[in-house]
């Protein structure tokens, strides 16, 4: 088998993309056992950072200038083995250094405790990524969606979203970043919200929103995020965003995205029909739940 074809097969094996026939051939040839041994060995190695340019310079300086006559080896075979092993090591190294991803599926909340004692609860359809191995010295989380954080004191704690960054020093707060808007509510301690050159410091029972590049501060009266108590709150927001949240909370598809209206209010998560009434009745909208209860049609 040509070297490139063999490397491709090994890479596909690592990703679990071999067909049953190819996997059986790999097992019967003994190659799979050899590959698994290599993985076990590499997994126990803490690979250091490698300076490629320095290593190449050292190689050139140490390379002998004279060549002597030696017995010819099958270089194609040797290079094939070396390339395959390097491919496996590189793939394992990349996999081991991927950020940790936590997701909350639709209709579920996901709770996670960090190694320092901080914790996060992800709202439906949300996710975070962070470097678990370097968490002690680099407490940085990338958030898509909405999450409630309880942060232990220590070094800086950053929550990055595409709409702005929240900086924390020991506190409890909620971050919602869907679409092009950012909402942050502080329940304990202090947080700093940054968007470009603008920033706002929040203390207990304060919130800030960033909509269309405008940062607006306000007070909150509830003691925890409403979604954690089974309700979703909206502040004069597009119905498309309300429908998107409805889809996440009930794992349904809403047909009604062409209605150019806004919604100010709350819908509860306990029952789909109740939630639809809470959204549609104040706006004079009609809704129909299809028989499979996986689709909803909304009209004016």
Image (cartoon, grey):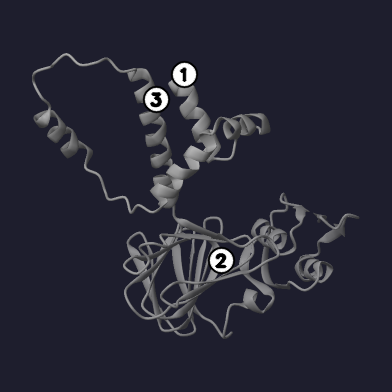
Foreground residue among 45 and 115: 45
The numbered mark, 2 or 3, whose residue comes first in the sequence reads: 3
**SS at mark 2?**
strand
- Local packing at callout 3 (Cα closer than 10 Å; few below 14, some 14-19, many 20+) is some
* Residue that carries the numbered disc 3 in the rendered image: 80
Image coordinates of residue 132 in percent, x first then y, are 42, 62
- Image disc number at residue 124: none
Image coordinates of residue 166 in percent, x first then y, are 41, 68
The residue located at (46%, 44%) in the rendering is: 37
The numbered mark, 1 or 3, whose residue comes first in the sequence reads: 1
The numbered mark, 2 or 1, whose residue comes first in the sequence reads: 1
The residue located at (34%, 65%) in the rendering is: 138
| 253 sits left or right of 1 in the view | right
Residues at marks 2 and 1 touching, judged by CB atoms closer than 8 Å: no
The residue located at (64%, 74%) in the rendering is: 227
The quadrant holding residue 222 is: bottom right
Gap between marks 2 and 3 measured at Cα: 48 Å
**SS at mark 1?**
loop
- Local packing at callout 1 (Cα closer than 10 Å; few below 14, some 14-19, many 20+) is few
* Residue that carries the numbered disc 1 in the rendered image: 2
**Residue 17 to residue 184: above or below:** above
Gap between marks 1 and 3 measured at Cα: 8 Å
In front: label 2 or label 1: 1
* Residue that carries the numbered disc 2 in the rendered image: 146
| 114 sits left or right of 53 in the view | right
Residues at marks 1 and 3 touching, judged by CB atoms closer than 8 Å: no
| 246 sits left or right of 54 in the view | right
**SS at mark 3?**
helix
């Amino acid at each position: 088998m040509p070297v490139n074809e063999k490397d491709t097969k090994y890479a596909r094996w690592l990703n679990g993309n071999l067909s049953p026939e190819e996997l059986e051939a790999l097992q019967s040839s003994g190659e799979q056992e050899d590959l698994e041994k290599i993985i076990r060995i590499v997994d126990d190695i803490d690979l250091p950072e490698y300076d490629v340019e320095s290593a190449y310079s050292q190689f050139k300086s140490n390379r002998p200038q004279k060549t002597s006559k030696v017995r010819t080896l099958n270089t194609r075979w040797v290079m094939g083995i070396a390339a395959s092993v390097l491919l496996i090591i590189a793939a394992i190294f990349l996999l081991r250094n991927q950020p940790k991803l936590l997701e909350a599926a639709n209709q579920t909340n996901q709770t996670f405790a960090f190694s320092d004692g901080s914790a996060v609860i992800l709202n439906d359809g949300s996710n975070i990524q962070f470097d678990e191995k370097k968490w002690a010295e680099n407490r940085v989380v990338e958030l898509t969606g909405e999450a409630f954080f309880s942060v232990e004191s220590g070094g800086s704690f950053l929550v990055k979203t595409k709409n702005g960054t929240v900086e924390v020093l020991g506190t409890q707060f909620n971050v919602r970043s869907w679409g092009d808007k950012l909402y942050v509510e502080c329940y304990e301690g202090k947080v700093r919200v940054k968007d470009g050159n603008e920033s706002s410091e929040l203390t207990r029972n304060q919130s800030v929103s960033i909509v269309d590049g405008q940062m607006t501060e306000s007070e909150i009266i509830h003691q925890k995020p409403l979604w954690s108590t089974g309700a979703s709150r909206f502040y004069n927001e597009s119905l498309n965003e309300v429908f998107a949240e409805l889809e996440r909370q009930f794992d349904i598809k809403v047909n009604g995205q062409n209605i150019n209206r806004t919604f100010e209010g709350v819908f509860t998560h306990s029952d789909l029909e109740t939630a639809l009434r809470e959204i549609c009745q104040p706006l004079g909208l009609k809704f129909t739940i299809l028989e499979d209860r996986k689709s909803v049609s909304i009209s004016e």
